[in-house]
Amino acid sequence: MPPRRFSPFRSLGPLPVLLFWRRFSLRHARDEWLQTLLLLLILGLGVGTFLSIRIANRAAVEGFQLFTNSLRGPSDLVIESPSGIPIEDLPEIRNRLGAIPVDLFPVVEQTLNFLPNDPANPDTVSSPVRLLGLDLVQVRALTSGGIGDNPEEFWSTIDDPQHLFITQTVANEWKVGVDDVIDLIVSGRRESFSIRGILPEYRDETPLPRNLAIVDMAALVKRLDLSLVDRVELLVPEGKFRKATIEQAGQRLTEAFGERWKISTPADRSAEGESMTAAFRLNLTVLSLIALLVGMYLIAQTLDATVSRRRREIATLRSLGISPRDIYRLWLSEAVLYGMAAAVVGLLMGTVMATLTVEAVTTTVRALYKDPVQTATGLNLTDVGLAFALGLIGSLVAAWLPARDAASTPPAQFLRMGKRIPPFPIFQHPWIGMAAIIIGGMLIFLPPWEMRPGSTIPVAGYTTAFLWLVGGTLVTAGALKGIGRLLHWLARDNASARLAGSRLRQPTSRHQLALSGFFVAIGMAAAMAFLINSFEHTVTRWLEQRLRADLFVSSIGFQGADSGQRMPGEILDQIAATEGVESLDRFRSVKVEFDGLTVNLGGARFSLLGNQQELLWINGPLPDSQRPPDADATGYANENFVNRSKATLGSVVTIKTPGGDKQIWIGGIHADYSSDNGLMLIDLPVLETWYRINEYDTASIFLKSGIDPARVQAKLREQYPGLAIRQNGELMEAALFIFNQTFAVTRALQLIGLVVAITGLVLSLLSLLRESGRELSLQKTLGMSRREIAATTAMEGLGIAITGLLAGIVLSLALGLVLVYVINRQSFGWTLQTAYPWTDILILSTNVIVLGFLISYATGWLYLRKWKQEAL
């Protein structure tokens, strides 16, 4: 008669699940509370890590919503241009709308920085604060909390050109209060402001951003001598025909200004931010699942240990008529119990970790993309559902093999066999792992999946990594026997080493599951170190190529082209005329639309290329004589632009500008790692003409021969306190600091994986010691001391650690190449130079070996203190 197939969807039989949990599962969890607690913390850490990254990703995407949504509700339409909207054109917008009932809200957006008086660190600034110039008459309710409802007081405040309203968070950081007058940095200049009120925490039921300051737009425009507003937001009143009114207004604006400006909705802006960061957020999510994968190995290890320790109970249940199918179901139900408890722990840990993770992700997004608003964090029902789904699914998958083992072993065999149950059959077939590795290697050559134009997902790369992780565990499990034979052969005269070697020569499933978790964690941690090291090596070489000037200038607190911290051209003109300055190169980039993509169009002085400035060329540059006669300008595209747009060297692309479509001939392809949404460089005078630009992101100063950079730097810092003026080495240090911030989340995930791996080793040793009562009794009877027995456990744990370490290093080399040449290139379009982190690997290996030995020794030593002798 063929054996009955086990199915988790059939009836449980005579033993109810709740009774099984109460009489068996909970009793053992209470007796072994430390091991149970460690297990729940590890699995909960995996769930919590995933949730915290999910919350941080959601906060980053929500941060791309229009900043002023919380001030008066979300706008219905937005008019914007890379160069801004001329103030003189605002009446024309109103005229074009005619009688359509639409309220217009012009917005001027700047960035404020508080400059502490610290002579030792002249560039030290506070966190950037978003300054909005609004029509305060339209949003008067925001300011009433600060200056009261007295109309005379309100108008006198608006008439004060120094007035400023800030949030309580900003007031606390700056240590200021109402009526205080302070100096702030705005547009590269030091300006005095008078704090006239504290903004409320909520606008209706919507919380206001914490890093917010507002001022009346008219006063700000006059004070900074602005001729442009950053955007115009339109709001349609509520009513029966509101939707039709929005469509009518959008159509009329597009017909009138579609060639000059971008007409969009808040949904478009949100989708743009989500699209830009899609690859980055997906990579973080995949990496966050590594801790969960290691936790699944530990769940399998723990449940396998319970099968070993409770073999008499299983035999008794079978003798009482419980079928193999029901045994299978009962063990899976215990995994459900673990999964639910781990989900609760994961929700708590995820909430706590989210606060730190959001800060790290926001920092990374600010460095790579643009400056989003850091939104509040919190769980929603979807997060709760995902936590329980991950906990339950992870536990059930991990419990599958131990449950089948418990159900398929006959009662007589349970009672006959010792406590060292042989490993799972799947670990006896390393060819399965080799097949998975080979298939994964073949998938590398598949193209990525293109979600939308310019956004690709390296599905094949992720699949390859997964197959290598799973296949590698099966291959590595067989290597444990070789380590045991080697230890047994090398230590012929050492009883502890020979005993440890004999245990490793005949590993149990606990040995191999612990080794698998260790292998995955080490491999992924070292592979991420490979990626980070390669990126740092590449970026350093790129910076050395680009940073050839004597001094570099930016607004204090500048953190990227999208931070809004730009310098007026008049100030740079004055610097260029400073004694000792030979030339000054300005840089400015704007966001442009190209074939449905949002890319950067940057301006730099081409006359300096090949002399004082240089690009890191990949292809080209082509001679200007090959430029087509109908091209409006020559452009040098970086590889991100080429990969996203499918353009090639020598092709002509069309860019929309306020003055109409412009043809740009790609005369060269260069490497650039400042952002991942594509950069096209054109000659700066051309960019200035097309976009009417007179504000700049950064500037490079080249000094005359024999001029001391430090002397000029000190002079300029004294004259322009609102500018950050750095020498070459200082800027390199600042750039690498931003680089390290960019990988803050990745390094945290590395650490979490290693913590899980080390804790898994402790769990493994605890399980193995608990099932070794007879062996311990025999060793005590033969006269071995407590120290010698602890040395046996130390060598056993060290054997697992070394095997996992060596195999993990091999895995990291393979995964590192996939991360650098497949996943990174298909996600971000960057070509990196490989640099294996030998120093990091040496430090990691030393720590793993030392910790593995000490933890294994301490585990054996402490456990023997409460060991109870078993009958031989």
Image (cartoon, rainbow, N blue to C red):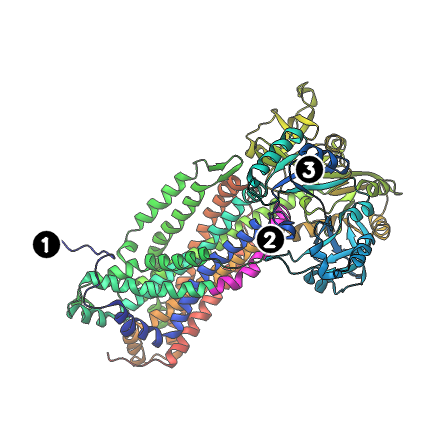
Q: Secondary structure at mark 2?
A: helix
Residue 1's tag is: 1
Query: Earlier along the polypeptide chain: callout 1 or callout 2?
Result: 1
Disc number for residue 362? 2
* Whether residue 125 can be seen here: no
In space, the residues marked 1 and 2 are separated at their CA atoms by 62 Å
Q: Is label 1 or label 2 in front?
A: 2
Q: Is residue 606 above or below residue 191?
A: above
Give coordinates of residue 434: x percent, y percent.
Answer: 34, 46
**Residue 364 among magenta residues:** yes
Residue 97 % position (x, y): 67, 34
Sort mark 2 into few (<14), some (14-19) or many (20+) by Cα contacts within 10 Å: many
The kind of secondary structure the magenta stretch mainly shows is: helix
Question: Which residue lies most toward the front here?
Answer: 240
Q: Nearer the viewer, mark 3 or mark 1?
A: 3
**Disc assigned to residue 192:** none
Could you tell me the amino acid type at mark 3? Pro
Disc 1: CA contacts within 10 A as few (<14), some (14-19) or many (>=20): few
Residue shown at 69%/26% (left/top)?
A: 633
Q: Are marks 3 and 1 in contact (CB under 8 Å)?
A: no
In what quadrant of the picture does the N terminus appear?
bottom left
Which mark sits nearer the N-terminus, 3 or 1? 1
Q: Which residues are magenta?
A: 348-372
Extreme-top residue of the structure: 629
Under tag 1, what secondary structure? Answer: loop
Q: Position of residue 556 (x, y in %)?
A: 75, 51
Residue situated in front as seen by the camera: 275 or 827: 275
